[in-house]
Image: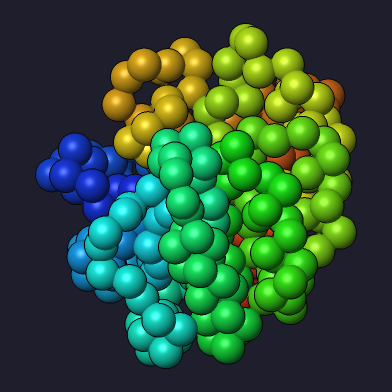
Amino acid sequence: MPFVDSHCHINFPELNENIADVLAQMRQNEVVSALCVSVNLADFPQALALAERYPNIYASVGVHPDYEGVEEPDVARLVELARHPKVIAIGETGLDYFRLKGDLEWQRARFRNHIRAARESGKPLIIHTREAAADTLRIMAEEGADKAGGVMHCFTETWEVAEAALAMGFYISFSGIVTFKNAKQLKDVAQRVPLERILIETDAPYLAPAPHRGRLNQPAYVKHVAEEIATLRGITLAEVGQCTTENFARLFGLGKNYWQNY
Ligand SMILES: [Zn+2]
Ligand SMILES: [Zn+2]
């Protein structure tokens, strides 16, 4: 029964320094693959190094909206870095009006560049949005993000926002937040998104799912996210694993049973 962690940061030191153990835990829990998501250009080489070293690890390239004052990527640079065969996505990118305040025009400009790069490179987007749903959807529409496709990662918005993203062909990814008792609205969204558009993720090292809440997260724990979705939808854990693994392969252009070669 395969599971894939569609979004994690195993290049961050707290996980990277124990990478052999992180990968062993994945194997023990049937987590066959993980996408290591870049948050800025300075950390991209570490993410890529993991993807080059381990067949079942993939990387993305992008600059997260929470990183102010770092090296700004233009479209050509992102397209160039995304040419590597193990770089399967552009991001994470998007808007975050929760962590940063003030004039965030630079965030919106950076987001537009990522969408343009995704369209040009043919690699899908990983979108982060926090307290910025209306602007996120507006810029996605203005820049033709539907032509690139992608995923709304660590989704915490309303069903209406999910519907708008689904209408643009996007997938919705659920993190450990969906396992939290107080996440009522999110549990409702997780019941309504079509199964063939759901991805699961940890966003490790952050946001460990129950019963590990508050501790260091790791890709192996993505199974708890799958368990919660299975419970909410009244289907088996195997169905959630199979379906989300196939969804991951479809979105990122990997063969349907790509993970069986590892
Ligand atoms: Zn994020
Ligand atoms: Zn992330």
Looking at the picture, does residue 227 appear above or below residue 139?
above
Residue at 46 percent across and 84 percent down: it is 75
Residue 145 location, x and y as percent? 70, 71
Residue 207 location, x and y as percent? 43, 28
Residue at 38 percent across and 63 percent down: it is 63
Can I make out residue 204 in this image?
A: yes
Q: Quadrant of the N terminus?
A: top right
Residue 87 location, x and y as percent? 42, 74
Q: How many marks?
A: 0
Residue at 69 percent across and 75 percent down: it is 143
In the displayed structure image, the side of residue 87 where residue 160 appears, left or right: right
In the displayed structure image, the side of residue 192 where residue 130 appears, left or right: left
Which sits in the foreground, 138 or 244? 138
Can I make out residue 83 in this image?
A: no
**What's the colour scheme?**
rainbow
Which sits in the foreground, 72 or 103? 103
| Furthest residue in direction left, as rendered | 17
Looking at the picture, does residue 13 appear above or below residue 11?
above
| Furthest residue in direction top, as rendered | 181
Residue at 73 percent across and 56 percent down: it is 137
Looking at the picture, does residue 14 appear above or below residue 147?
above
Residue 129 location, x and y as percent? 58, 46
Q: Quadrant of the C terminus?
A: bottom left
